[in-house]
Amino acid sequence: MDSDQVIVERHESVVQLVINRPERRNALDWSTLTLLHNSIEEIAADEGVRAIILTGQGDRAFSSGVDLAGMGEGTSQRVLHDSRAKVAAVIQAMWAAPQPIIAKVRGYALAGGFGLAMAADVVIASESAVFGTPEAEVGLWPFQITVPLLRFAPPRIALELMLTARRMDAAEALANGLINRVVPDEQLDATVEEFAAELAGLSSAATGFGKRSFYQVSGSMDHEHFDYLATLLTLVNQFDDAKEGLVARREHRQPRFLGH
């Protein structure tokens, strides 16, 4: 199950999944999302696994989101639409897994990476962590992560982040209830490992059913929401502003949006 892009590390009953693209700030290309999705489903089926840690390689980023440089120019729109839905597929696999999932966040957690962090059951971040939805900077909108973000963020805070693309530091994220704990960078690994071991010692039967009931009660229409949001994401990607935003990002300049 190991690969270059997703590393699986098992320590007794705890598995750590590492997004391994540090040279791209652990950006999520389509193959990485597929590997992450398949890994989560395989681990979820292993009754010997009691807790899962999700993190990114290195100190710079948990994940900077979907890799805009690899959006697939020349690929058919049908293929791109299906590919974009992979973020939602990973999120739903995380919620379907009976094991509790801890997001260990160091550095940037942006866009789709922010969404994966919010989809975790527990988020423990270092003081260097930065959260945000920068899609507005390139003429897009963070459709796919709306569901997990609204599970835990106050709606007005979530909408402000989406509208402005501003970044939120770990202290503000904690104050707004988006994450569970903030610890010094050098204590992050030990804190998460200790917490994962604590979770692994609980009843997996009770935890599995309890987690399922939590997500069922707090959002019974998630599948329909994701389908609707995926459609909007594909629609907005066809706008001239979105195309201009992606070109501007590649050319390292400010986009010139025209409103269509």
Image: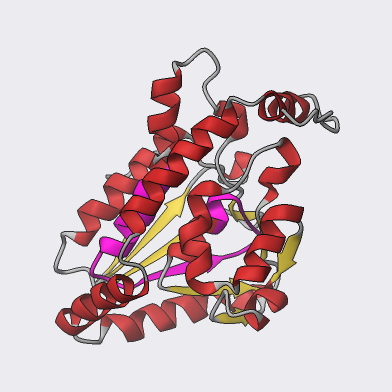
Q: Is residue 38 above or below residue 55?
A: above
Residue closest to the eye, 19 or 247: 247
State whether residue 7 appears in this view. no
Question: Horizontal and vertical percent for residue 241?
Answer: 72, 28
Q: Is residue 210 above or below residue 247?
A: below
Report the residue at 80% width, 28% height from top.
258
Q: Is residue 234 left or right of residue 257?
A: left
Q: Is residue 32 above or below residue 202?
A: above
Residue closest to the eye, 202 or 184: 202
Question: Horizontal and vertical percent for residue 160?
Answer: 71, 62
Q: Residue furthest top?
A: 74
Residue closest to the eye, 148 or 156: 156
> Which segment did they paint magenta?
87-114
Question: Horizontal and vertical percent for residue 253?
Answer: 85, 30
Q: Toward which corner of the image does residue 98 lie, by quadrant?
A: bottom left
Q: Is residue 145 left or right of residue 132?
A: left
Q: Toward which corner of the image does residue 170 lie, by quadrant?
A: bottom right
Q: Please state, as top left, top right, bottom left or bottom right, where the N terminus lies in the image.
A: top left
Report the residue at 28% width, 80% height from top.
200
Q: Please state, as top left, top right, bottom left or bottom right, where the C terminus lies in the image.
A: top right
Q: Inspect the magenta stretch and tell me whether residue 90 lies in it.
A: yes
Question: Horizontal and vertical percent for residue 96?
Answer: 26, 62
Please count the marks in the image: 0
Report the residue at 58% width, 25% height from top.
238
Q: Toward which corner of the image does residue 47 lie, by quadrant?
A: bottom left
Report the residue at 21% width, 52% height from top.
42
